[in-house]
Image (cartoon, grey):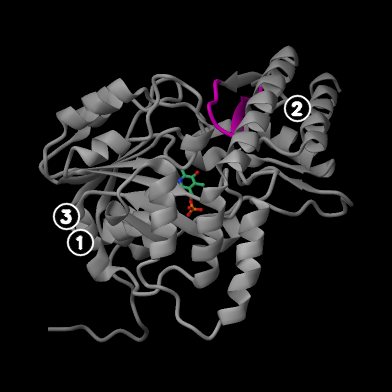
Amino acid sequence: MSIVTSEPVPRKGILDIAAYVPGKEHAPGVAKVYKLSSNETPLGPSPSAIEAFKQAAEKLEIYPDGQAVALREAIATAYGLNAANIMCGNGSDELLGLLCHVYLGAGDEAIITQHGFLVYKIQIMGAGATAIEVAERDCTVDVDAILAAVTDKTKLVFIANPGNPTGTYVPVAEIRRLHAGLPKNVVLVLDAAYAEYVRKNDYEAGIELVSSNKNVVMCRTFSKVYGLAALRVGWMYAPAGILDALNRVRGPFNMNSAAIAAGAAAVRDQAFVDKAVEYNLLWQDKLVHAFTALGLKVTPSVTNFLLVHFPDVDGKRAPEADEFLTSRGYILRMVKGYGFPNALRMTIGPEEANRGVIEALGEFMTR
Ligand SMILES: *Cc1c(COP(=O)(O)O)cnc(C)c1O
């Protein structure tokens, strides 16, 4: 028997979801504002990507290629992959959502970690499943905690490697140990949105694990180092069986033509990526030194952002620092929702913004 209600009622669990809140972008009354809240690159995209985007405007009446072949082939060439194992999405957000849609239902569980990316939980709950959150250790994903949380209801495990907002990473040996401990029917999702920024010998984004297993996928994005956040370009490297399932529910034209063209041009310009990574490493180092000298703690980061911890002292905590920085036009990210009530996440920005934040925090700490 169906019960008639006075208005439409969403499926059970949907209204328990806390909607994602994007990083702030305004500082009321401040003339010059630097948005350092969403891990966008200060260098923009490759000029060739902008040119490709403009050319896409000439053919707006034509449907995009539903297979995004040009983009998948360009990615495959740049990263040494098989194009048949690549799926593109409207941002990696879409791909994370498709994985939940396909592998989760009521009664299922998916594992996320204490300071994990909030999109995972939203998509898990959206699919009607339960998100099981496990502790991290020193702001880093803890493989043993994940393995201990696996039950016969577990269908997906999400880890961001490197993590956001922590900026830390898990070495490839640990990722292999995690995979080895998971049942074969559990999909391990390696979200490597910041992989290009990492310069560590013991880090791997997950390509080899995907190639040699049926239950591992790697998600990547063009929103960060490639500077195409506005266009929403994400991609996933995955085994054939998983792609086959996802392709059955994927929107047939989920990638627009401008995103395909600009993404393909961007990924061909690896010299641009190298420059962006070099710039990032330089400022990562300078900012960590400057903040540490001010008495702030910074979680060691391999990414284009820093998690800065404030003293537990009246007038010096993160919300006050956020207010102070915002009044100067520097918009960082409050990360209370990620389990860090007394920290701010700062995206490494243009030089003048980085210098400005150092100066403003110097004032804040000594005022
Ligand atoms: C920025 C980010 C993404 C990228 O999302 P898009 O939808 O591709 O813009 C994915 N995962 C994490 C952890 C991120 O920080």
SS class of the residue under badge 1? helix
Q: Which residues are magenta?
A: 300-310
Say which quadrant the N terminus sits in.
Answer: bottom left
Assess whether residue 137 is covered by the magenta stretch. no
Q: Quadrant of residue 52?
A: bottom right
Q: Return the mark for residue 315.
A: 2
The residue positioned 30% from the left and 84% from the top of the image is 5
Q: Residue under label 1, please give it.
A: 244
Of the two numbered discs 2 and 3 in the rendering, the one whose residue sits closer to the viewer: 3
Q: Is mark 2 within 8 Å of ligand 1?
A: no
Labels 3 and 1 touching (C-beta < 8 A):
yes
SS class of the residue under badge 3? helix
Of the two numbered discs 1 and 2 in the rendering, the one whose residue sits closer to the viewer: 1
Count of numbered badges drawn on the protein: 3
Q: Nearer the viewer, residue 337 or 307?
A: 307
Q: Residue under label 3, please give it.
A: 241
The residue positioned 67% from the left and 35% from the top of the image is 348
Identify residue type, mark 1. Answer: Asp
Identify residue type, mark 3. Answer: Gly
Q: Is residue 18 visible?
A: no
Q: Earlier in the sequence, mark 2 or mark 3?
A: 3
